[in-house]
Amino acid sequence: MKAWKVRKFFGDVVYDLRSRGLLPVVILLVVAMVAVPMLISRGSSKPSGASLLPTSAATEVAPEAERAVVAYQPGVRDYKKRLDDDSATNPFKLPVTKSSAAADSQLDSTVTPSSGSGSAPTGTGTGTATPTGSTGTVTRHTFLFHSVADLSFGDASQPLVRHKKIKPYTMLPNDTAPVVVYLGSTLDEKRSLFSISKFTEQLTGDGRCAPGPGDCSLLSLGPGQSEEMVYADGKTYRLKINKINRVIIKNPSGG
């Protein structure tokens, strides 16, 4: 190959590396290729035995090298010894704890038997206990209860009509043009629920609307709260919750 072609080839390579910013990298690689073998050859010429001689500091065992595993006796894994203090129990029967026994005694203490009427006693739960006689025997009774709203409803410009024991699904003010429908009350005696007619709008008051105030399909009111609404006939109606009472269902079967 001619000399000028060799010079031109290397010149193009150097120009290309310089334009790409790789010329310093190539120079460092060439220097490393020459210097590394020389350093390796110098290091191998030194005697290596001196570095392998043990010293007093090296002979001492480092704390990290000490054994961290202690002897362990697996005697506690013997199931016969581990279950000696336990008694056999029925897994399908719930154990009676002190808290449940205390709750039963508290429930019994809140119940008062009726006097002379022969009816079931009233209480705060679904199970009651009434002591009979002097022998300490206990008679168990079961009852159901529900919450009934005492409310007032009517034309806001007129005296409201009071409904002390309104039944669920009662249409107000009447079945012909129902503005609201009473759905029932919660057992905690805190809220009464009403279905609002699609012809009712402009609801204002203390109630909570679902899905939202601008589109109220379900209204929730508490004792002492009231709500006013405008019906399609142009009248403004007012709904007020006087109180919510818990009432025992005397005949749950309906027979």
Image (spheres, rainbow, N blue to C red):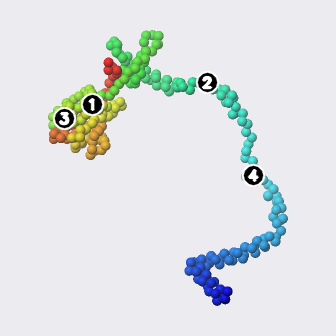
Q: Earlier in the sequence, mark 3 or mark 1?
A: 1
Measure the alpha-carbon separation of dots 2 and 1.
53 Å
Q: Position of residue 23 (x, y in %)?
A: 61, 79
Q: Position of residue 48 (x, y in %)?
A: 82, 66
| Rendered residue at 28%/40% (across/down) | 217
Q: Position of residue 238 (x, y in %)?
A: 21, 37
- Residue indicated by mark 4: 65
The amino acid beneath tag 1 is Tyr
Considering the numbered disc 4 on the image, is that residue within a helix, a strand or a loop?
helix
Considering the numbered disc 2 on the image, is that residue within a helix, a strand or a loop?
loop
Image disc number at residue 169? 1
Q: Earlier in the sequence, mark 4 or mark 2?
A: 4
Asked whether the residues under the numbered discs 2 and 1 touch, taking CB atoms below 8 Å apart as contact, a structural biologist would say no
| Rendered residue at 64%/89% (across/down) | 4
Q: Earlier in the sequence, mark 1 or mark 4?
A: 4
Q: Earlier in the sequence, mark 3 or mark 4?
A: 4
Measure the alpha-carbon separation of dots 1 and 4.
81 Å
Measure the alpha-carbon separation of dots 3 and 1.
14 Å
| Rendered residue at 22%/44% (across/down) | 202
Q: Nearer the viewer, mark 1 or mark 4?
A: 1
Q: Nearer the viewer, mark 3 or mark 4?
A: 3
Q: Is residue 184 left or right of residue 130?
A: left
Count every numbered label the image shows and give the total: 4
Image disc number at residue 177? 3
The amino acid beneath tag 3 is Ala
Q: Nearer the viewer, mark 4 or mark 2?
A: 2
